[in-house]
Image (cartoon, rainbow, N blue to C red):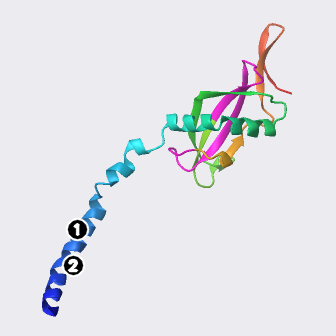
Amino acid sequence: MKKRTKKLLVILMPIVLITGGLLMKLGTPLDHFLTHAYTRVTKEDQIDYLKKHEQEMTEHVKKENPKLISIQWDWESIEVVEVQPNAGGIPTGKKYYELVIEGKFNGIVDSILKSGFYLDSRNSYPKMSDIFYLNSDDVRYLHTIDGVEVWDYYK
């Protein structure tokens, strides 16, 4: 029985090693499901997620700037950008991704505010803990002075 077991091991061991090596090199049938596009987060998924957390986003921005009474988010403005940190134009640090969303405030049609989220990757969900307010002192609106349209800071 010992000889038979040893022969079986000698025959099976290379088969197992070769099969394992091929699976690692070529991938498994499950890899298709794990890496296929429909398992990745799309822009529509990100928008749906943010819509579910709209109140949290609004509260965060209102806390940063108490002059803002209401926020009207522009869901179509959502953009994921790759950011390269720099010091005076010289690249420093590792690139990262941000999801940026624009909105209007206090019912002013021609107003602008921006908020964003740090992302783990281009196709990932934003985390509410990673929200930031892009224009704390730069909330602007368009108005007319003597017939000329002017962008001004909201004070």
The x and y percentages for residue 5 are 17, 87
> What is the residue that sits farthest to the front in this orientation?
1
- The three-letter code of the residue at mark 2 reads Met
Q: Is residue 7 above or below residue 17?
A: below
Q: How many marks?
A: 2
| Residue located farthest toward the bottom when viewing the structure as drawn | 2
Question: Would you place residue 35 above or below residue 72 in this image?
Answer: below
73 left or right, relative to 48: right
Report which residue position mark 2 lands on: 13
Frontmost residue, 73 versus 92: 73
Quadrant of residue 132 in the image?
top right
Q: Which of marks 1 and 2 precedes in the sequence?
A: 2
Residue at image coords 82%, 26%: 154
Q: What are the residue bounds of the magenta stretch? A: 101-125
Q: Quadrant of the C terminus?
A: top right
Q: Which residue is mark 1?
A: 19
Instruction: Give how far across and how far down residue 103 sits, in percent.
Output: 68, 28
